[in-house]
Amino acid sequence: MENNKSSMGLKVALGIAVVLFLATGFYTMNLYSSSKKVENDLTEQKQLVMNDLNAMAKQYDEAIGENEVANNNLIEARARIQGLIDSLKISETNVKSLWRYKQKYASLQKEMDVLLAQNDSLRVENSYLATSLDSTRVRLEERTIFTDSLLVQNNALAEVVSNASVLSAVDLKASGVIVRTSGKVIPTERASRSDKIRVCFIVAKNKLIQAGEQELYVQVIDSKNNTLGLNEQVSFGEKTLNYSLISKFNYENANLNICEFITSSGDFASGRYIVNVFNEKDLVATSEFTLK
C-alpha cells in the first residue's frame, strides 16, 4: 500500500516537472522570437534612414554642381548631412535609440525649408531637389510612431550622432597639372605631361568645431596601388593610415577652400587614381580621376 502511494506521488511530481519544463521552453522560445524581431526591425529601420540621407545628399551634390559659384549655405547643409551619414556608417547594428537622430534630422529639415525659401532661383532650377526633400520629410514623419516606440532600446545611436561634430570635406576634386616656371597651373589629363597632382576640396563650416589650427590627411593612390607623395604612416589605435600629405590650416568656423599638390619620385602612371581625405582615422571624402 505504501509502495503504491509512493509510486503515485512520484508520478505526480514527474508530471509537474514536465509541465514546468514545457512552459519554460515555450516562454524562452517566445522571448527569443520577440528579441530577433526587434533586432531585425532596428536593422531595417537604420537602412531605410541611410537610404533617405543618401538620396538627400545626392540631390545636394547636383544642386551645388549646377552653379558655377558654389552656394555656401547649400555646402554647409550638405556637410551636416554627410556628418550624419558617416555616423550611421560606423554605428553598430544593435542600435538602442533613434530618437535623438530624429531630432537632429528634423532640425536640419527645418533649416532647409528656410534655405529653399531664401533661394528662389535655386529652387526653380532644382525643383526635383525640393520634391525629393519633401518626400523624404514625409517618409520620416510616417516613421515617427515606430521611432518613438523604440526609444528605450535606441540610446546608443544618440552617442553616434554626437560624433558628427568633426571636420568634413566636400566638393573634392583632383587632376594632373602642368606647373609653369611662372607659377601658372594648367590642368591636364596626360600622365606624361603631369608635373604634380592637384587636390582641392572645401572644409565645410561646422559650429561644433572649435576654431584654430586643424589638419586633414590626404591620400592619393595611383593605378598601380602606390601611395604617392610622402607615403608615411600614422596610427590611430589599431588602425594604420598611409598618407600622401597632411593638410594643415587655420579653421575659423567658416567654409574654407583648400588646394594641395602631390609630387611623385618618378613619372606618373596612366590609369585610374583614387583620392581620399581623412579626419584622423575617419574617411570624410573620396573621389577619383584618370590620367591617359
Image: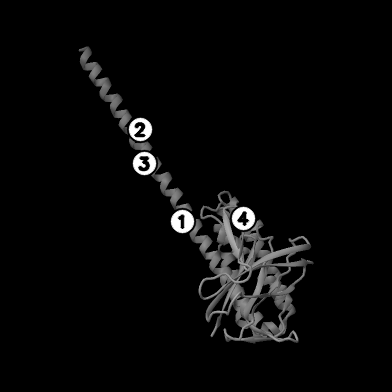
Q: Secondary structure at mark 4?
A: strand
Residue picked out by circle 2: 20
Between 202 and 107, the one nearer to me in the picture: 202
Tell me if I can see residue 56 in this picture. no
Residue drawn where x is 59% and y is 61% of the image:
241
Mark 3 Cα within 10 Å, few/some/many (few <14, many 20+)?
few
Q: CA distance from mark 2 to mark 1?
A: 30 Å
Q: Which mark is residue 26?
A: 3
Identity of the residue furthest to the top in this view: 2
Quarter of the rendering containing residue 21? top left
Which residue is label 1 attached to? 40
Q: How many marks can you see?
A: 4
From the viewer's perspective, is the residue at label 3 or at label 4 nearer? Answer: 4
Residue visible at 64% across and 79% down in the picture: 196
**From the viewer's perspective, is 238 left or right of 34?**
right
| Numbered disc in front, either 4 or 1 | 4
Q: Nearer the viewer, mark 3 or mark 1?
A: 1
Give the percent coordinates (x, y) of residue 131.
60, 78
Q: Does label 4 or label 1 sit earlier along the sequence? A: 1
* Residue 281 quadrant: bottom right
Nearer to me, 179 or 103:
179
In front of the other: label 4 or label 2? 4
In the image, is residue 174 above or below residue 9?
Answer: below
Closer to the N terminus: mark 3 or mark 4?
3
Q: Secondary structure at mark 3?
A: helix
Quick one: label 4 or label 2, which is nearer the N terminus? 2
On the image, the x and y values in percent for residue 122 come to 69, 83
- The mark that comes first in sequence, 2 or 1, is 2
Q: Is residue 157 left or right of residue 34?
A: right
Cβ atoms at labels 2 and 3 below 8 Å apart = no
